[in-house]
């Protein structure tokens, strides 16, 4: 007999405790190969494909789109061949891959999705009644291919619900989920939908009409958009940062005319183009070597300060999932061209949604170029648990006193937000002034290289 293997949601790294199901890539009854991606999930860091280490027939799957699955909870169960050369009983479908090599029956998870070659068309399915996901069976389902259909009650349709808590609430209040119209994406039933139905029952009225998909009605008729996935993770992190870190901000205007002239000079020679962000990143690594207190973070219990030996430079980038902060690892070891290349690669990955969780975590300092949005200044919230962030406004032509005379110069505003627990204002001001001096006189960097 085939052996039923339960595949649970693996540890996706970086301390993540769960993931939200985005879409299923396999159906119940489908024959899958070892390490074939079976589900796409969204974590607080990225959208990833999860491969299953077992090859065989999918007998059950757990979690619906929009529902969160905890690490270690069941994702799918798969009926696999117990050993190479052992055939299944005649009542088990003949198209089940009964001769799976032993080495392919169970293998460790190999990553966040392994590209599988096209195996020639349609998915193979075995004894799957529609595409619904049944509850986990104690043994693999037995399908007699040649047997005539037996008259039976139709299986209940799977109602898309955002979480098990919503199902439990509906059950406790006697609400029939199948009778509700979900207000979430693709008719997903939200908690507010059940709450409206409960309130309607309390006053003996029919459930109130729901708004368009994508939000729920607030108490005054305003639309409330649920915090999910990346937005929820960002909200939680910013709230924690604002609650725990006593942050302060200082700023200064700087004449960036010479920095822009240097960039034009560099880009006039053969080789990769150098961006303003790459030059600013290089300035930051030099400044952090001079002021190492700012490349640090406070310990979880608040009893000490961790000073990091490497500069893992985060930078704000706009992606398809919103604003994200990819990290350039060991930026202090990279040349300006290398920093620029890595910034370009990560920016493109952010644009296409291809960033991995590892590329979005572990930063020790953040560079925020909000000037691309056409604004001059900002007082950003720190990227917890980092202790400092440099913000750069737009570079724009302004009247400026240069060498004793009024002139039109390219000016930017630099703002610096820091954790007041790791240093005092003198250190923060010294860092910001050094960065501004390098922007105004980029030749100063030669002393540091």
Image (tube, helix red, strand yellow):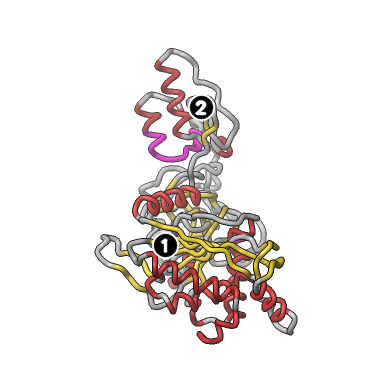
Identify which residue, 319 or 380, lies in the foreground. Answer: 380
Q: Is residue 185 above or below residue 202?
A: below
In the rendering, at what x and y percent does residue 406 appear?
69, 66
Seen as rendered, the residue at the extreme top is 204
Q: Residue at x 40, y 59 (%)?
A: 384
Q: Residue at x 43, y 40 (%)?
A: 163
Q: Residue at x 49, y 32 (%)?
A: 152
- 2 or 1: mark nearer the eye: 1
For disc 1, the neighbor class at 10 Å (few under 14, some 14 to 19, many from 20) is many
Give the mark nearer the N terminus: 2 vs 1: 2
Q: Secondary structure at mark 1?
A: strand
Which label belongs to residue 180?
2
Identify which residue, 449 or 23, lies in the foreground. Answer: 449
- Magenta span includes 312: no
Q: Secondary structure at mark 2?
A: loop
Left or right position of 375 against 228? right
In the rendering, at what x and y percent does residue 234 appear?
47, 52
Q: Which residue in the structure is indicated by mark 1?
A: 418
In the rendering, at what x and y percent does residue 1 appear?
40, 58
Q: Is residue 63 above or below residue 71?
A: above
Helix, strand or loop for the magenta stretch, by majority: loop
Seen as rendered, the residue at the extreme front is 404
Q: Residue at x 46, y 31 (%)?
A: 192
For disc 2, the neighbor class at 10 Å (few under 14, some 14 to 19, many from 20) is some
Identify which residue, 182 or 333, lies in the foreground. Answer: 333
For marks 2 and 1, give the CA distance: 49 Å
Which label belongs to residue 145?
none
Residue 34 visible: no
Q: Which residues are magenta?
A: 155-168
């Amino acid at each position: 007999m085939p052996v039923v293997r339960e595949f649970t949601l693996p540890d996706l790294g970086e301390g993540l405790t769960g993931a939200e199901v985005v879409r299923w890539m396999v159906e119940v009854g489908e024959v899958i190969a070892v390490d074939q991606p079976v589900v796409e999930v969204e974590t607080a860091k990225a959208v990833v494909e999860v491969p299953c280490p077992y090859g065989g027939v999918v007998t059950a799957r757990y979690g619906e789109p929009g529902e969160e699955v905890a690490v270690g909870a069941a994702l799918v169960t798969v009926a696999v061949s117990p050993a190479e050369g052992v055939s299944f009983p005649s009542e088990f479908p003949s198209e089940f891959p009964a001769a799976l090599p032993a080495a392919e029956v169970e293998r460790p998870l190999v990553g966040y999705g392994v590209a599988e070659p096209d195996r020639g068309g349609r998915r193979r399915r075995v004894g799957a009644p529609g595409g619904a996901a049944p509850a986990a069976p104690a043994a693999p389902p037995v399908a007699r291919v040649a047997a005539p259909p037996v008259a039976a009650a139709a299986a209940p349709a799977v109602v898309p619900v955002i979480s098990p808590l919503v199902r439990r609430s509906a059950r406790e209040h006697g609400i029939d989920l199948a009778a509700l119209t979900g207000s979430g994406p693709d008719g997903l039933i939200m908690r507010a939908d059940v709450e409206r139905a409960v309130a309607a029952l309390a006053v003996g009225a029919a459930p109130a009409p729901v708004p368009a998909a994508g939000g729920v009605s607030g108490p005054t008729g305003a639309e409330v958009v649920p915090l999910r996935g990346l937005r929820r993770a960002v909200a939680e992190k910013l709230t924690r940062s604002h609650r725990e870190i006593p942050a302060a901000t200082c700023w200064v205007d700087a004449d960036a005319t010479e920095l822009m002239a240097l960039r034009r000079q560099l880009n006039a020679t053969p080789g990769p183009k150098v961006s303003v962000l790459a030059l600013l990143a290089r300035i930051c690594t030099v400044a952090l070597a001079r002021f190492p207190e700012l490349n640090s973070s406070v310990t979880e219990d608040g009893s000490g300060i961790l000073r990091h030996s490497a500069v893992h430079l985060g930078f704000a980038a706009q992606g398809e999932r919103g604003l994200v902060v990819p990290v350039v690892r060991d930026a202090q070891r990279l040349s300006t061209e290398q920093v620029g290349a890595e910034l370009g690669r990560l920016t493109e990955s952010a644009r296409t949604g291809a960033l991995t969780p590892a590329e979005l975590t572990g930063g020790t300092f953040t560079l925020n170029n909000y000037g691309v949005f056409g604004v001059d200044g900002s007082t950003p919230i720190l990227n917890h648990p980092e202790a400092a962030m440099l913000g750069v406004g737009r570079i724009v032509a302004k009247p400026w006193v240069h060498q004793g005379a009024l002139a039109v110069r390219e000016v930017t505003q630099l703002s610096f937000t820091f954790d007041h627990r790791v240093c005092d204002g003198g250190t923060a001001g010294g860092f910001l002034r050094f960065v501004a001096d390098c922007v105004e006189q980029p030749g100063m960097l030669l002393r540091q290289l």
